[in-house]
Image: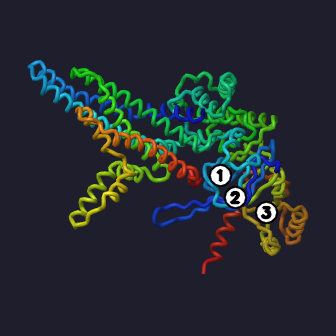
């Protein structure tokens, strides 16, 4: 119950922050940018180039989903690193923690509130995406759902990472570490590439082990392939969801560990 | 089990700041406090003395470097103890986008107060603190005084057994201060324990039962208000000594004499010493101008104690120099 009360206050606070305003503006920009493509595709369809128009529509939607994913991840990063920091800066945290709630309850409430806010943003983005799908004359399929869910999942991963790390590290360090972990797979691959230049080859098992802690972006690739009607590979998709669970739990545990004995105020 | 509502033993807090060049600040050092049920305990000290850090330690916002704290026999980390506590921080920050009833409702939910009771209590408190008319306004539009009143209202929402108030009257005009004072006295009559820090010593003097004075993180005086003020009350003696012989003799006796225009003045709490001073003045040709029994105010005692403590610090530092 107390967790939900804290979550409710977090959502209300985020709702009134400028993040949502920026979200709206960028979402409008996305619509504006893509509308021109959609108009172009509609013209092409009318001109009888339906096969090419269909391909173009898929390409545009792929691009939109990617933009939405990046944007949502950026918002998730910002929320994750600032949500408790803002409370500390403003002093509103003391009003809550002076009440009979444990620190872990406060943290879980803030996390749930942030998650709720992110889902709210995705509801808006999903609405926009759905509108664009219908504008291009396509029917909504499982692939479209998976595309959105995959991106949403990644943004939740980013939120979890940033939120957990920000409880004990400075905002900047937490943000950078989140980005490193977020892009870790790419970095490991680049590292392996560098080693190959000096004739060192990492065994597959080592590379796989190094890659494991990082979100499986391959899974998202698979989701997009499904939009392009390439047969969906269940394994990487499963990895994304596995990471969703393990990263969220790990983030809360790390956050709680860092937050539980943290001094929330300095000298007089 | 101890009957103290608040009990601290050798409570100390050292903050370490600076990323590369670590700087240690001893905010609170070996603080022993015992606050009994139903008393108003005033916690006094100059700015930066360690008052707010001590309160933050009591509330569990910061953790002690060493020493222990017990509130109703439980450590402050045990969040259940806060069910019995009302707290008003010095600079209260609210969710400015909420109205006062919305804020109190959120806090009431955290206290697990049933809905009907919550509604009734919120209305009563808002009326009591003169905020009922402004109940539809966002807190962000409130004046400082209104925010302070709201702070007090939220501190009383759970009908606490212990109130911890950091500068409760700082945003009030004299009328508002009297209103708060009456509320605190009424709470005391109902058996509520009140721990308050304040700069307004005249207020404290009117309502406090016991006092602790903290300076540079250390308690320099603690006890019943009447005893502390009483122990510093005594006799003021004014005289004229044109030859300077009486002054020399008094200084030999260790009596501090200060000049006030043509007159010389001295103060002592010891009745027999006061008599001896008068004898010396007369014996050395001085002219006695006044011999006045004086009750000192808490403010005078506070300034004297803090001043003496600061002087001792200075002396020990200078004495420690090679």
The residue closer to the viewer here, A180 or A53, is: A53
Number of residues whose C-alpha sits closer than 10 Å to that of mark 3, classed few (under 14), some (14–19) or many (20 or more):
some
Q: Position of residue B284 (x, y in %)?
A: 85, 72
Contact between labelled residues 1 and 2, with CB atoms less than 8 Å apart: yes
- According to the image, label 1 marks what residue? B57
The residue closer to the viewer here, B251 or A264, is: A264
Chain ID of residue with mark 1: B
- Which numbered disc, 2 or 3, marks the residue that appears first in the sequence? 2
Q: Position of residue A8 (x, y in %)?
A: 52, 31
Q: Is residue B145 visible to us here?
A: no
- According to the image, label 2 marks what residue? B11
Kindly report which numbered mark, 3 or 1, lies closer to the viewer in this rendering. 1
Residue placed furthest toward the top:
A46
**Residue A78 found in image quarter:** top left
Residue placed furthest toward the bottom:
B322
Q: Residue A252 — which label?
A: none
Alpha carbon distance from label 2 to label 1: 9 Å
Image quadrant occupied by the C terminus of chain B: bottom right
Chain ID of residue with mark 2: B
Q: Are marks 2 and 3 on the same chain?
A: yes
The residue positioned 84% from the left and 64% from the top of the image is B287
The residue closer to the viewer here, B250 or B221, is: B221
Q: Position of residue B203 (x, y in %)?
A: 73, 43
The residue positioned 63% from the left and 74% from the top of the image is B318
């Amino acid at each position: 119950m107390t967790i939900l009360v804290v979550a409710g206050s977090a959502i209300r606070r985020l709702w009134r922050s400028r993040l949502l305003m920026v979200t709206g503006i960028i979402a409008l920009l996305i619509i504006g940018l893509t509308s021109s493509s959609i108009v172009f595709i509609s013209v092409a369809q009318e001109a009888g180039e339906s096969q090419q128009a269909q391909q173009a529509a898929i390409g545009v939607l792929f691009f939109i989903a990617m933009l939405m994913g990046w944007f949502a991840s950026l918002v998730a990063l910002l929320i994750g690193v600032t949500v408790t920091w803002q409370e500390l800066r403003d002093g509103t945290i003391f009003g809550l923690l002076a009440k009979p709630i444990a620190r872990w309850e406060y943290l879980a409430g803030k996390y749930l509130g942030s998650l709720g806010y992110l889902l709210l943003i995705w509801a808006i983005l999903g609405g926009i995406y759905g509108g664009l799908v219908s504008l291009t004359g396509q029917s909504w399929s499982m692939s479209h759902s998976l595309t959105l869910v995959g991106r949403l999942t990644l943004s939740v991963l980013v939120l979890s990472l940033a939120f957990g790390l920000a409880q004990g590290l400075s905002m900047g360090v937490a943000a950078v570490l989140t980005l490193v972990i977020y892009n870790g797979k790419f970095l490991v691959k680049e590292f392996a590439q560098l080693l190959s230049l000096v004739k060192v080859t990492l065994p597959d098992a080592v590379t796989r082990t190094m890659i494991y802690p990082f979100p499986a972006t391959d899974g998202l690739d698979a989701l997009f392939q499904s939009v392009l009607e390439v047969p969906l590979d269940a394994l990487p998709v499963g990895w994304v969801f596995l990471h969703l669970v393990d990263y969220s739990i790990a983030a809360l545990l790390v956050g709680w560990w860092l937050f539980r004995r943290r001094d929330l105020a300095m000298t007089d | 089990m101890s009957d103290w509502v608040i009990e601290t033993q050798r409570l100390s807090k050292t903050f370490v700041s600076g990323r590369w060049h670590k700087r240690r600040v001893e905010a609170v050092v070996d603080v022993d406090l015992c606050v009994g049920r139903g008393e108003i305990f005033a916690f006094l000290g100059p700015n930066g003395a360690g008052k707010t850090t001590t309160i933050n330690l009591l509330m569990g916002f910061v953790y002690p470097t060493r020493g222990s704290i017990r509130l109703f026999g439980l450590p402050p980390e045990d969040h259940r103890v806060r069910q019995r506590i009302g707290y008003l921080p010095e600079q209260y920050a609210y969710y400015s986008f909420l109205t006062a009833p919305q804020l109190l409702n959120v806090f009431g939910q955290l206290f697990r107060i049933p809905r009907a009771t919550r509604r009734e209590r919120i209305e009563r408190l808002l009326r009591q603190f003169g905020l009922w008319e402004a109940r539809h306004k966002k807190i962000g539009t409130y004046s400082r005084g209104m925010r302070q009143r709201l702070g007090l209202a939220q501190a009383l929402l759970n009908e606490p057994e212990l109130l911890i108030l950091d500068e409760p009257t700082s945003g009030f005009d004299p009328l508002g201060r009297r209103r708060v004072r009456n509320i605190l006295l009424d709470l005391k009559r109902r058996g509520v324990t009140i721990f308050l820090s304040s700069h307004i010593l005249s207020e404290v003097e009117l309502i406090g039962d016991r006092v602790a004075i903290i300076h540079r993180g250390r308690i320099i005086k603690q006890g019943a208000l009447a005893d502390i003020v009483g122990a510093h009350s005594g006799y003021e003696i004014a005289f004229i000594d044109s030859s300077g012989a009486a002054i020399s003799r008094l200084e030999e006796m260790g009596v501090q004499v200060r000049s006030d225009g043509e007159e010389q003045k001295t103060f002592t709490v010891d009745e027999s010493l006061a008599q001896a001073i008068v004898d010396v003045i007369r014996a050395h040709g001085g002219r006695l101008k006044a011999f006045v029994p004086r009750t000192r105010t808490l403010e005078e005692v506070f300034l004297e104690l803090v001043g003496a403590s600061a002087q001792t610090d200075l002396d020990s530092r200078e004495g420690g120099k090679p």
